[in-house]
Structures are given as C-alpha cells and as structure tokens.
Image: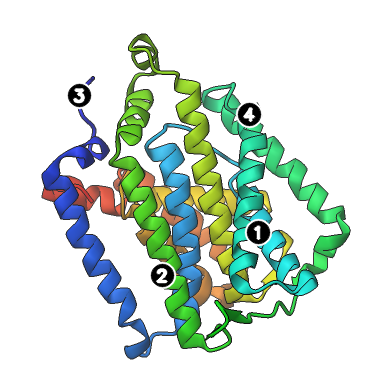
Amino acid sequence: MAAMTDSSIAATPRAIRDEMIVFVIMAALLLIVPLTGIYPFFVMQALCFALLACAFNLLIGYGGLLSFGHAMFLGTGGYIAAHALKVWGVPPELGILAGTAGAAALAVATGLVAIRRQGIYFAMITLALSQLLYFIYLQAPFTHGEDGIQGIPQGYLFGFLNLSNSTILYYVVVAVFLFGFLLIFRTINSPFGEVLKAIRENEPRAVSLGYKTDHYKLLAYILSGTLAGLAGALKVFVAQNASLTDVEVSMSGLIVLMTLVGGLGTVFGPVVGAFIIVAMQQYLSGLGQWVTVIQGGVFVACVLTFRRGIIGEIAHYLRRSL
C-alpha cells in the first residue's frame, strides 16, 4: 500500500483504543443531555443528521465514492416509515424497519446502476437518480406532494415505550444513533473496511491483488444507503412529518457540507459537522436566506483554512485517530 493517510491510522490497536475512549465520552455526554436543560429537539434532530452524515462518510471517506444523491435514501426512509405509521397503523418498530428496508432496496437498485462508473460520472449518476426520485415523490399520491405527510403518530415502541414523551423519544434516538455509529465503526475497522481503504487509495492495485472492487463498492453503497434510510425513518418521529425537503438536491449538498466541515474520513467528524450545521439552521433561522450564505462562508473557510475539517485538523495536530 501507499503511504498511510490520517484515516488509515484507524486500523492500529492504539487508534481503536483512542476512538473507543472518545466514543464512551460522546455516549456519556448524550445520555446526560436531558439533565442539562439543553433543548432535546435540537439534539435529536442533530443526531438524525449525524447518523446520515456518518453513513455518507462511510461511502466517500473510506470508499472514495462521492454521492450527490444521498438525500433520496433519507427521504425514502422517511416517506415509507411515515406512510406505514399513519396509513397502515403499524407500531413504531415496524415503521422504522419498513423505512430502512425501503431505503436498502433503493440502494440495491440504484447501486447496480451507479457503481458501474467512477469519479465524477458516479456522482452525476447518483445526482440524476436522486432528482428522478424527487419528481416521482412530488407526483406520487401517497406522499401528498408539496404538503407532505403530516401528523404522524409516534405510538408505543415495543408496546410500552411512549414516544410522545420527549425524554423517552430522546433516549430512543440516542440508542438508534449509537447503534448505527457502532455498526459503521465496526465496518471501517474490519477486513472489509481495510479493503475499502485499499480501493480508495489505489483501485488498480486492489484489482491486481484479486479483489472484486465493484462488489466491495456496491456493498459499501448499500450499507451507506440503508443507514441513511434508518436516519430518515428515525427523523419522522422527531419532526412528525415527511416532506420533499428531505429529498431535494440541496439536502444532498448539506450532507456533503456536514461531512467536509467535520472532517472527511474521520470517525467523529461527521457528528461534529452535523451538530454545527443543524445549530446554524436552528439558531440562525431568523436570518432567513442568509443562513445559506453563512453556511457557504463556513464551507469556504473550512476549505481554505481547515482542509482536513475540524476533527481532521485536531486529529492531525494530536497525532491521534479521531
């Protein structure tokens, strides 16, 4: 292999130990949020986007595949879960599973088409597929067009956890986020993850070693899309609606921004990036369209001064894997 990048350090025992320590600290901080007086809705929304950004980072940061269409998985997971909950009357756990399964099926279908191309061609195909799905959802009767699906019942998870209780809902969101995060963490530190990194660094060399790189990239794409759908299904319970906003191309751009601001190819970068971007949307909403301008300014500043992203720069300075 060529010289190791910052993100490839993650395979060493010391790096895994450092990351697990940071994970425990992050989990502890999330668990005590209800005791601190911080607005739980903000944290729940940020965690949904953090899971989405982590799923996207698995694809681009470790697989080297830039997707401009990840919003289609977020929106599909949300729409299917919302429809199942409101129209079919299924319990929350089945609604989440339905939304996640729908996103997984979409990832398989679109992955078989997109994975045949590389670089900018792959990115453009995912963008085109996402836009196609946007117009389908705009016209489909079950999505209710521009009105979206409103008033989604939260129900009782497993029959006894009342999700209309904000504290219970918060801990459920935290549990699902931590599950998704650990799944991604285990993936990137597995033999499968090492092959992904090898493909990212030098795909022709990986091919020469006998790896079927298209199979690995397709599996990474499917896993990334499935977890993005899980984030969309989870977001339905927080926002209690599913709308076209989650499928728009601007949402895909926002996912890229979260990942780059936090740190591409880092474990915790997408989480930090998601919290920063969601905080800007939440607390600067009074500025209207100027929020987009500010986000663009943050992106330019990061590209010029923090090219590794916030966590990437911290990890590089400390010589640690984060």
Compared with residue 49, is residue 35 higher up or lower down, i.e. above or below?
below
Compared with residue 309, is residue 222 higher up or lower down, i.e. above or below?
above
- Give the residue at x 29% y 54%: 310
Residue 3, disc = 3
Q: Earlier in the sequence, mark 3 or mark 1?
A: 3
Residue type beneath disc 4: Leu
Closest to the observer, 141 or 259: 141
Q: Earlier in the sequence, mark 4 or mark 3?
A: 3
Name the residue tied to disc 2.
Answer: 175
The answer to whether 52 appears left or right of 199 in the picture is right
- Nearer the camera: disc 3 or disc 1: 1
Number of numbered callouts drawn: 4
Instruction: Bin the neighbour count of mark 2 within 10 Å (Cα to Cα): few under 14, some 14-19, many 20 and up.
Output: some
Looking at the picture, how far across and down is residue 128, in whole percent?
70, 36
| Element type at mark 3 | loop
The answer to whether 24 appears left or right of 13 in the picture is right
Residue type beneath disc 1: Ala
Q: Real-space Cα distance between discs 4 and 3?
A: 32 Å
Q: Real-space Cα distance between discs 2 and 1?
A: 18 Å
Q: Real-space Cα distance between discs 4 and 1?
A: 21 Å
